[in-house]
Image (cartoon, coloured by chain):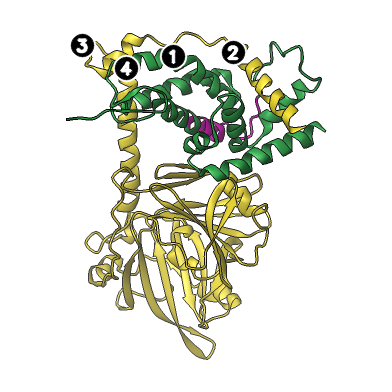
Chain colours: A yellow, B green
Amino acid sequence: MTTKLEHDLAALFEAQTRGLGVGEPPAVDDVELVATEAPRGRRPLLVAAVLLVVVGTAAVGLVARNSQSKAPSATTAPSTSAGHGLLVPVGLGGGATPDVKIVEAGHRSAAGLVVSPQGTPYLISIGPETPAEPDAERREIGGYLVDFASDDAFNRYALNTDCIEVGIMEPSRATGGPEGEIGDLFERLVVNDDAVTITAPRGWKSLGAGSPGRLLQLTYDYRFGDGVHTVTLAQAIDTPIAALQSIRLAPLDPARLDGQPAWTFEWPQTNLRSLIWNDNGNAVMLTTDLSLDQLTRHAAVDLQHGQTFDWDGALDLAPEGTLPAPVAPKDTCGESPVLTIE
Amino acid sequence: MEQSETDTQGSTWPHSADGFEGFYADSWTGAVRVAALLTQDASAAEEIAQDAFLSVLGRWPEVREPGGYLYRCIANAAAMYHRRAGTVRRKLPLLNPPAAASATFEELADVVAALPFRQRAVIVLRYYAGLTEQEIADTLKCRPGTVKSPASRALSTLLKELA
């Protein structure tokens, strides 16, 4: 049966291509001009096209670098009057000196988050190749050979290409197997050197993708009930929540904040919980020992777009976290990998 | 002394600049047809083929197997086209079905057009372009063993749909 089908396929393709009526290729003279040297004063179409390809490639690189350079530095700290709209706790005035810290994420990486129709979040990350986990097993999924490892929290799938590693993390509770949701994702994965594109399957939702930038952390005391709780407010400007490194610690659960989608997770081996959401394009993460209900109904609500807090001054004095040493890309690979989720 | 090597297609590497002309002329029609089968869109095929040749030309001095690299560029461009086209479903016209074809030939064209891109790419590269598993893996940037899975899924979908 299969042999007949294979024969029919070959015949079908022949019949379809016979009816195409392919024209002659564009003049070879134009192509030759590129391979040798174009006469002065003449700009053949194909020469212009080649230049566009080269310029276009450079532009892509610039876009990737620019997206990282958007992140603020200690010397060019974001100004609340510049429209970034960073959040600050209500009541935190200019005279306060809460603990402010800048944490910089690793370079040459990007991450994205997609949610299946069943509500399962899948974190997709790309970056330099890392050694396979000791207990990883090789599995064939969606046409790719990937390294699979699992623990109580996550199933992790790693695909290594010539240039980068593509990693997908799913909650261990997602047990669809290779033929399930994870298979759908790998089926729609296209790797082109250091550019990775995933077309979200029908019914899936993308929560964005991007490169991690600097994370501005503000730690303050929050009075709730009879107690005082330490709260850390972390914000990354113009960054999708997928780029927050912390979300790799534990699986995300959906939540609602002021009627809008949000996510929450519990930090392993602590009593801390984080609430994550997107605020005008900025990734926001609020972490404390309060319950989810207390977080969403009180601590997160008691934030406002700050006009009273001197971010510029605070960040000028803020210490920087340790920067991981960048891993040099291979010669054949681009400087910054690009992850696109469509 | 600079050494040259012979690639799997019999040409030498490094290539001379004027060798591109012959490659271009010889490969044009096949490139357009493969692009058409991958995208299922005849109108996009020539443009994709031309872009692919431009990519080959840009790497002509260094590329060892231009034919393989050309297929890879076409597959990449077709994948990008497929993503942009979204849910728009097209089917290549079927002007001259072979006389020996079964009654389900038109239906087969329908099912092939509806296959996920990666599965369609594998069967087009295998049953039209005649590539080996290794060559398909190189074209689609996966390992040879993993070509079998989308091929088998595609055939099983076709058999199921045509049953």
Name the residue that disc number 2 marks.
Answer: A20
Name the residue that disc number 1 marks.
Answer: B26
Name the residue that disc number 4 marks.
Answer: B19
SS of the residue at dot 3? Answer: loop
Please name which of the two marks, 3 or 4, marks the residue nearer to the observer. Answer: 4
What residue appears at the point 57 percent right and 78 percent down from the top-left corner? A294
Start and end of the magenta stretch? B77-90
What residue appears at the point 77 percent right and 15 percent down from the top-left corner? B100
Q: Are marks 3 and 1 on the same chain?
A: no
Residue in front for this viewpoint, A238 or A61: A61
Asked if the residue at tag 2 contacts the one at tag 3, i.e. Cβ–Cβ closer than 8 Å, the answer is no
Marks 3/2: CA distance?
Answer: 35 Å
**Label 3: few (<14), some or many (≥20) within 10 Å?**
few
User: As shown in the figure, which amino acid type bears the numbered disc 4?
Assistant: Gly
User: As shown in the figure, which amino acid type bears the numbered disc 3?
Assistant: Pro
**Label 1: few (<14), some or many (≥20) within 10 Å?**
few
Marks 3/1: CA distance?
Answer: 26 Å
Chain letter, disc 3 residue: A
User: Considering only order in the chain, which callout, 4 or 1, is on the residue closer to the N terminus?
Assistant: 4
User: Considering only order in the chain, which callout, 2 or 3, is on the residue closer to the N terminus?
Assistant: 2
Marks 1/4: CA distance?
Answer: 11 Å
Quadrant including the N terminus of chain A: top right
User: As shown in the figure, which amino acid type bears the numbered disc 1?
Assistant: Asp
Residue in front for this viewpoint, A306 or B82: B82
Marks 3/4: CA distance?
Answer: 20 Å
SS of the residue at dot 2? Answer: loop
Please name which of the two marks, 4 or 2, marks the residue nearer to the observer. Answer: 4
How many marks the image carries: the answer is 4
* Whether residue A169 can be seen here: yes
Name the residue that disc number 3 marks.
Answer: A39
Chain letter, disc 1 residue: B
Q: Position of residue A123 (x, y in %)?
A: 52, 58
